[in-house]
Image (cartoon, rainbow, N blue to C red):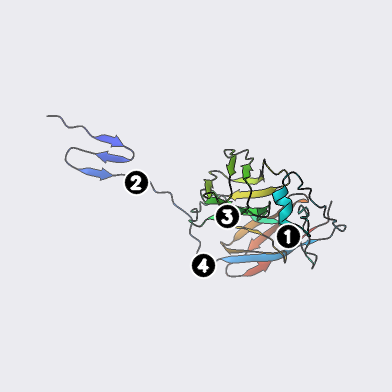
Amino acid sequence: MKCYGLLVAGLLIGCSRKEVVVEKQAFFVVDPATAGSVSGSVRYAGAKVNAVVIDMDQDPECVRLYQGSPKKEQTVVVNPDGTLANVFLYLKSGLEGKSFESPKTLVTIDQKGCWFQPRVIGMQTGQSLQVTNSDPVTHNIHPMAQVNREWNQSQAPQETPILRRFAKPELMIPVKCNVHKWMRAWVGVLDHPYFSVTGNDGSFELKNIPPGTYTVAAWHEKLGLREETLTIVAGRKQSVNFSFNGE
């Protein structure tokens, strides 16, 4: 009797033995003993921003959530100390040839107060995005991706969370709600873990960076992009600051 081997989904199966052929992707592992970091802040040096009150009259339930204190537009959010919130910081170049494993942690967006919270998020390719709806109204989340697959899904109050992933790097993916036109968010998808979003103190930090020369970029949805070149030295904490002038 003749015997033939069969190759199925990476398994070489013979008549008398089984040989498993596994091709594992080699992920880059940073040596913490030589890694460095960069931190800093983002300031706003432009004219005073007069936030516009959002008209939510199309949905009485949304209006009811803000009785006495109407919701204001948050395209440019300047903190009391003059720093800027919702700026996406990331390493734009310098990591070529390195592959990083996708984290198992969830990145979350909540639809709360007829608003996407947070407005700007970062995540890695292959990482899971969880979308929840904490409002008493139906929302719709619509990431208008160009590189990744575009998707559009409604979510009723307290409905099961939506779980999605992005397979490819893409900066920045605009997100809208087709039900409430004022709801906006942005998603930065990278193939590495070096990104941060400024909050109410305008600060950021990128940790555990292997030594090398990098382009550090600061992105804002209205004010544009700023870049700085920085050389990370083994074991050293370094700083870089950005400023947007409002133009």
Instruction: Determine the secondary structure under disc 1.
Output: loop
Q: Estimate the spatial distance between the alpha carbons at disc 1 and disc 3, rounded to whole Å.
A: 18 Å
Q: Of callouts 1 and 4, which one flags the residue occurring earlier in the amino acid sequence?
A: 4
User: What x and y, as percent, mark residue 128?
Assistant: 52, 51
The disc placed on residue 85 is: 1
Task: Give the mark nearest the N terminus, 4 or 3.
Answer: 4
Relative to 185, does residue 144 appear above or below in the rendering? above
Q: Residues within 10 Å of mark 2 (few under 14, many from 20)?
A: few
Type of amino acid under label 1? Ala
Amino acid at dot 3: Thr
What's the distance in space between the residues labelled 1 and 4, CA to CA?
A: 30 Å
Disc 3, SS: strand
Question: Can the viewer see residue 88?
Answer: yes
Give the CA distance from mark 4 to mark 2. Answer: 29 Å
Front residue of 199/226: it is 199
Q: Residue beneath label 2, please?
A: 22
For the residue carrying disc 1, how many other residues have a C-alpha within 10 Å: few (<14), some (14-19), or many (20+)? many
- Residue at 70% in and 44% down: 180
User: Mark 3–mark 2 contact, CB under 8 Å?
Assistant: no
Residue 94 placed where, x, y %?
61, 53
Pick whichever, 228 or 56, lies toward us: 56
Residue 141 location (% of width, % of height): 62, 44
User: Marks 3 and 2: which is nearer the front?
Assistant: 3
Asked if labels 3 and 4 touch by Cβ distance under 8 angstroms, the answer is no
Q: Locate residue 4, reporting x and y percent.
A: 21, 32
Amino acid type shown at disc 4: Pro
Residue linked to disc 4: 32
Q: Amino acid at mark 2?
A: Val
